[in-house]
Amino acid sequence: MSEHVFPDDLKKAQAELHRTHSEYRALCQTLPWSVVPLPGWPGQKNPHSDETTTPDRPDSPGYTPEQATAEEQLWARIRELSVQVSTHPYWATVERGPGLVDARMALKNHPDVTAGAGDGSVAA
């Protein structure tokens, strides 16, 4: 159990940050590799072993307007929540140095935060 008593609003913001980051990662896995349409390229082979050293990259159609909007909105929310968590007044009550790092990690892994994150995953 953590020695820290985190305010509820800080725990809720951290849990929402975890959830939003998880949504963002899931969205990015569905997006084309390039924001704008770009041609792909063939993979490269090692001249000594014929082993493929870089994979083929297919043509990218680019993001649709809907995909671009979704990505921008989630990324903006991640930035907003990151600022909200990192500038919370609670951090002024924690001594600077290793104790602050320990407190930050304790918040990220707090049971209320990981339970509120939905899938239980914790982003670093």
Image (tube, rainbow, N blue to C red):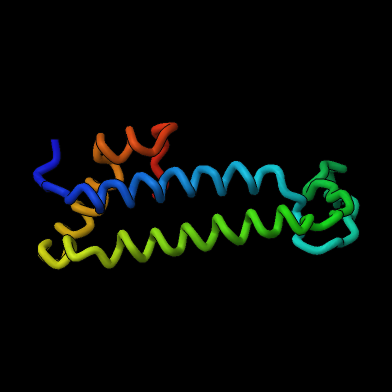
Vertical placement of residue 115 versus 36, above or below: above
The number of callouts visible is 0
Q: x, y percentage for residue 56?
A: 85, 47
The residue drawn where x is 39% and y is 33% is 120
Residue 78 screen position, x and y as percent? 47, 58
Left or right for 70, reference 50: left
Quadrant where the N terminus lies?
top left
Q: Is residue 15 above or below residue 84?
A: above
Q: Quadrant of residue 39?
A: bottom right
Residue drawn at 42 percent across, 33 percent down: 118
Query: At x 38% / y 61%, what residue is drawn?
Result: 82
Residue 73 spot, x, y in % from top left: 57, 59
Q: Residue at x 80, y 46 (%)?
A: 55
The foreground one among 120 and 97 is 120
Q: Position of residue 35 (x, y in %)?
A: 75, 61
Asked whether, in this view, residue 47 is left or right of residue 66, the answer is right
